[in-house]
């Protein structure tokens, strides 16, 4: 009797499973499987003279981009406020998922850009895109070789680009968007409009725009607290740098004792002594140098500072939206309150935040929460950038 009962029970479970599978196979329409007809009109898709619904398999993979899963985080300086600026008080925000370049933009990437815009753009625009190699020059130092060689000499190909201002970086993002999407469209057999016109988003084969990351995105990506996740939405600790612990040296394995970033160790000490150049770089270094953080991003501390999108205000933390915060102008904190014309401040609507610390900075500036600013048309030998991109078509 028990055997018969067990057999009948098994058959019942199989039948129930079949019903569930059948129900699931019918399913509801989704972005990638919209069905053959409209659920609200019953009209067929893709019929002659009918509404066209293109095939869509999700956002294409963009070159050099790493996926950054968004979520709740606490932004703000986790370091002592040694300048007493009080401009980055801790606050809780949510950052939507996005993509970010795994490396800084390198010299070879910019030379590629210069090659194509010299061929396709005006001479005036080409000249406006040239980096200022004189950022290396100093009346009191022999940095002349960097002025002549850093950008174009093959040995520096995969070193981070410097000498570009915020405006040039934004122009590069626009160019990169256009050429990457043109290539994706061609590969998918989608016609590319003449003269660089818009490829329809409805095609489903192109990417959202490359752009500079917001300060919130950059800081969130640098923290990479996903590596501290424990059980259900618990993080065991915050991070002073883009790695665990308060130390600047690798505590593990064959690299034990080696520095984890390229920075200035102290007054006059950029790399250590001959025979054991610990951080391996007196100036910038290879963009894939040092271990990546838990999001897979290289050099989110040290090497070069990086431009972000935001206009600088010291009290941004008071005015922020707590979902995807971004300051794009002087809203609620107008520039007239800072009296730049009267030389009472350097702040106006054309100063931009930069983050991350550089080869020429002490370790303090490598903490993700620290922030500085510079006029958007200025450049230095210590500031570069990397691009970011939204994750389109999702709610997280």
Image: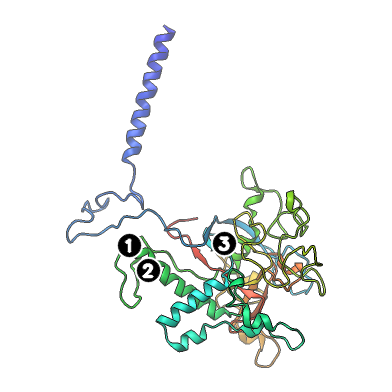
Image location of residue 211, percent across then percent down = 50, 70
Give the farthest residue toward the left. Answer: 48
Q: Residues within 10 Å of mark 2 (few under 14, many from 20)?
A: many
Instruction: Farthest residue to the top: give it.
Output: 1
Task: Describe the element under mark 2 as helix, strand or loop.
Answer: helix
Q: Which residue is mark 2?
A: 182
The correct choice, above or below, for 243 with respect to 334 in the image is: above
Which residue: 46% across, 89% down? 124
First of labels 1, 3 by sequence position: 3
Tell which circle, 1 or 2, labels the residue nearer the N-terminal end.
2
State the separation of the CA atoms marked 2 and 3.
22 Å
Residue picked out by circle 3: 102
Q: Which residue is mark 1?
A: 203
- Compare residues 103 and 11 and report the one nearer the observer: 103
Q: How is the image coloured?
A: rainbow
Q: Nearer the viewer, residue 125 or 49?
A: 125
């Amino acid at each position: 009797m028990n055997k018969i009962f067990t057999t009948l029970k098994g058959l019942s479970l199989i039948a129930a499973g079949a019903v569930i599978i059948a129900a699931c196979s019918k399913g509801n329409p989704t972005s990638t499987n919209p069905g053959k007809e409209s659920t609200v009109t019953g009209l067929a898709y893709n019929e002659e003279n009918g509404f066209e619904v293109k095939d869509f398999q999700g956002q294409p993979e963009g070159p050099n981009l790493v996926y950054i899963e968004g979520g709740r985080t606490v932004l703000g300086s986790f370091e002592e406020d040694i300048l007493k600026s009080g401009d980055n008080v801790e606050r809780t925000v949510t950052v939507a998922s996005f993509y970010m370049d795994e490396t800084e933009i390198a010299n070879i990437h910019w030379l590629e850009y210069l090659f194509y815009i010299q061929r396709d753009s005006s001479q005036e625009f080409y000249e406006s895109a040239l980096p200022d190699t004189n950022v290396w020059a100093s009346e009191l130092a022999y940095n002349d070789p960097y002025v002549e060689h850093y950008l174009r000499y093959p040995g520096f190909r995969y070193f981070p680009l410097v000498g570009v201002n915020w405006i040039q970086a934004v122009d590069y993002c626009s160019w990169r968007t256009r050429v990457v999407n043109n290539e994706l469209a061609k590969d998918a057999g989608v016609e590319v409009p003449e003269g660089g016109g818009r490829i329809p988003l409805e095609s489903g084969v192109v990417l959202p725009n490359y752009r500079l990351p917001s300060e919130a995105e950059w800081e969130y990506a640098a923290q990479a607290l996903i590596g501290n996740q424990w059980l259900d939405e618990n993080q065991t600790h915050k991070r002073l740098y883009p790695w665990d612990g308060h130390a600047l040296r690798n505590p593990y394995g064959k690299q034990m004792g080696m520095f984890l970033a390229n920075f200035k160790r102290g007054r006059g000490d950029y790399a250590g002594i001959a025979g054991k150049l610990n951080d391996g770089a007196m100036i910038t270094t290879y963009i894939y140098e040092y271990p990546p953080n838990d999001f897979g991003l290289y050099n989110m501390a040290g090497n070069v500072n990086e431009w972000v999108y935001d206009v600088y205000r010291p009290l941004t933390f008071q005015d922020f939206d707590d979902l995807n915060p971004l300051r794009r102008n002087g809203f609620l904190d107008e520039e007239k309150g800072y009296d730049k014309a009267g030389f009472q401040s350097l702040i106006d609507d054309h100063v931009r935040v930069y983050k991350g610390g550089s080869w020429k900075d002490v370790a303090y500036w490598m903490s993700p929460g620290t922030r500085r600013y510079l006029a958007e048309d200025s450049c230095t030998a210590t500031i570069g950038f990397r691009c970011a991109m939204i994750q389109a078509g999702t709610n997280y």
